[in-house]
Image (cartoon, coloured by chain):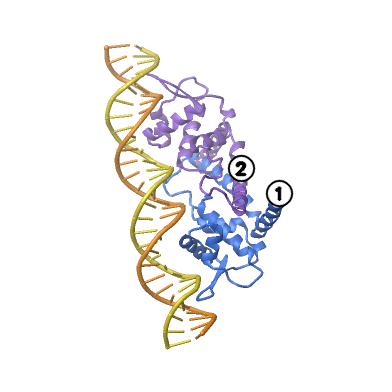
Chain colours: A blue, B purple, C yellow, D orange
Amino acid sequence: MELSCKSEYALLALLELTAHYNGGEPLQIRQIAAEQNIPDRYLEQLLATLRRSGLVRSQRGAKGGYLLAREPWKITLLDVVSCIEGLDSQPPEPNKDPKSVEGMIVWEVWQEAGQAADAVLQKYTLQDLAEKRDSRQQLDLMYYI
Amino acid sequence: MELSCKSEYALLALLELTAHYNGGEPLQIRQIAAEQNIPDRYLEQLLATLRRSGLVRSQRGAKGGYLLAREPWKITLLDVVSCIEGLDSQPPEPNKDPKSVEGMIVWEVWQEAGQAADAVLQKYTLQDLAEKRDSRQQLDLMYYI
DNA sequence: GCCAAACCCCAGTGGAGAACCGGGGTATAC
DNA sequence: GTATACCCCGGTTCTCCACTGGGGTTTGGC
């Protein structure tokens, strides 16, 4: 399980789409990238991946952009991360063919640790994070006054 | 949190030391490497790291080698992994200086997921894995007969 | 119809780190 | 004193991440 910069970018972009979910207007890559300080050509690739996985849908041509494919409370962080990082390492790495007894045991613990992390990512939805952000910003405002 | 090949090598080596823990004789790098199919010059570096962290101690000179520095039930997998991978990423990555509100929230979830994985690694000791291996091997033997 | 705005696809680059390998130095048992 | 181990430091190769760029294709507005 990787939690790299890629996943963070994707999540920030999806949070932006969540914020504008009510209006049916699509959001453009450039706007998202500018808002979240993400290199736009890179974000483009990530959004393409998210689209192929069915998390967002796109509208081509002028006035086009991206929208969430489903409601923000139906998209978990695990959906996003496993889509971006590509959960393709199901085989226990094709390096050591017979895989010793010790190797298997270590691998099983690795798996268990990864599943524990996944469980955390699965219990949060985009909606949850958006709400958390809203209350956080309101708090910041109170401190400012 | 990384769970790379390095950590696996280190764990396998420590399991080998656990198996020979009763006899006070040190185990040599070459023996461990041969037993676990690890490149020996690479394993040497890992053992040096483990030594600097106080998980193993070494005996130099002829008839030298490595021993566990404490009892195998007092060494958790988290001890090993955080020593090898280096748990130096406490600062929220020194890339984006002001770190937006969204960035902070994402980072906090990342932290929570990492801590969940750490908790799994912390509940297993070298002793636990060694026992698991012993019972597994006994099981294999039964199947063989 | 045409053009500009947007997405779409594919390919390449630079840097960092992982996994090794090797050359010498140093301590210690015999 | 010498063989046997660890010790330290550096280099090499390879892969992957983050990012960039060059074109194409679809679409709305004039």
Disc number placed over residue B115 in the picture, else none: 2
Image coordinates of residue B61 in percent, x first then y, are 38, 19
Crowding near pointer 2: few (<14 within 10 Å), some, many (20+)? some
Q: Is residue A79 above or below residue B109?
A: below
Q: Secondary structure at mark 1?
A: helix
Could you tell me which residue is drawn at 48 percent across and 49 percent down? A92
> Of the numbered discs in the image, which one, if any, rests on residue A143?
1
Residue at 48% over, 64% down:
A44
Contact between labelled residues 1 and 2, with CB atoms less than 8 Å apart: no
Of C4 and D7, the residue lying toward us: C4
Marks 2/1: CA–CA distance: 30 Å
Circle nearer the viewer, 2 or 1: 1
B84 displayed left or right of C30: right
The N terminus of chain B lies in which quarter of the figure?
Answer: top right
Looking at the picture, which amino acid does disc 1 mark? Tyr
Image coordinates of residue A86 in percent, x first then y, are 50, 57
In this view, the residue in front, D7 or B5, is: D7
Where residue B116 sits: x, y (%)? 62, 44
Identify which residue is drawn at 52% across, 34% down: B80
Under circle 2, the secondary element is helix
Q: Would residue A43 appear left or right of B38 to someone viewing this image?
A: right
